Image (spheres, rainbow, N blue to C red):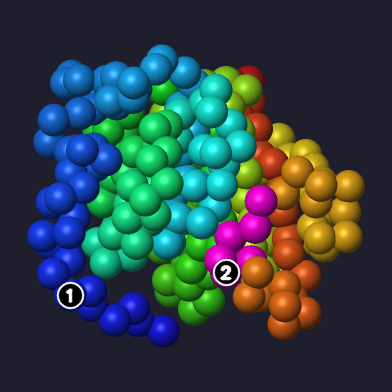
Amino acid sequence: MRMRKKKHGAERIAALSYLLIDPECCGVGKRPVSEVFRTPAPVQLEIGCGKGGFILAMAKKHPELNFIAMERVSDVILSAMEGCAREDIPNIRFINADARILKELFSPGEIDTLYLNFSDPWPKKGYAKRRLTHENFLMLYREILPEGGKIIFKTDNAALFDFSLEEFEKCGFSISELTRDLHNSAWNAENLETEYEKNFSAKGFPIHRCVATVCPLPQPKQPQ
């Protein structure tokens, strides 16, 4: 369902511009994104932050880390930014942009951990390249994650999960902490729920989760 356009949205975002990272001013060859925070710390990124419930909870739980929330829909990211401002959370910044510009925004290895929470499954075959776990995006993530960096992926969509596992393997990620029922697994104790997750779980949908770790890409076989 499309979100209703927020009244005075542009003005409200402008009033919170101190929380917003400007892609024109930061990135490769410009100011490092990590410098926008008050305190130096490892940077973790959520792509598709929605209304911000997950990233706000993570930032409060882990004040020793810095977090960036990325969302391409301005009315959606506004809700997250206003939540951050209300609670005066110092270790979150926001990017209102498409994930396709990641390579321009971040230097190699600048992001410690990347979160993909309940991304659009784009179920039609012809739309596979739009999925945030398609190999085209995974190779982008490899550019900004260090070796050993992690992608933590959650979804309620079993077909997307199966597709993603194949894509992770294809792109040189090792898989760990895999579960097809997160809320009844050993990893649920540390789990912070997103808004979508609460809704899906309440309706009885099992939550699928895994951790994908960046490993060296396999070397192509030399012709004999």
Where residue 166 appears, x then y in whole percent?
66, 52
Regarding residue 95, the answer to whether it shows in the image is yes
As drawn, 158 above or below 44: below
Name the spot of residue 36 as percent of width and height, x first. Answer: 28, 25
Under tag 2, what secondary structure?
helix
Q: Which residues are magenta?
A: 192-197
Does 81 lie within the magenta span?
no
* Residue at horizontal 29 percent and vertical 59 percent from the top: 78
* Dot 2 or dot 1, earlier in sequence: 1
Q: Is disc 2 in contact with disc 1, using a CB cutoff of under 8 Å?
A: no
Which residue appears farthest toward the top when viewing the image? 40
Observer-nearest of 73 and 148: 73
In the rendered image of this protein, does residue 196 appear above or below residue 184? below
Residue 75 left/right relative to 111: left
Amino acid type of the residue that numbered disc 1 sits on in the rendered structure: Lys
Report the number of numbered marks: 2
Query: Would you call the spot at circle 2 few (<14 residues within 10 Å), some (14-19), or many (20 or more)?
Result: some
Q: Horizontally, is 120 left or right of 191 in the view?
A: left
- For the N terminus, the image quarter is bottom left
Residue 139: in sight, yes or no?
no
Name the residue: 23% across, 27% down: 27
- The residue tagged 1 is 7
Circle 2 sits on which residue? 196
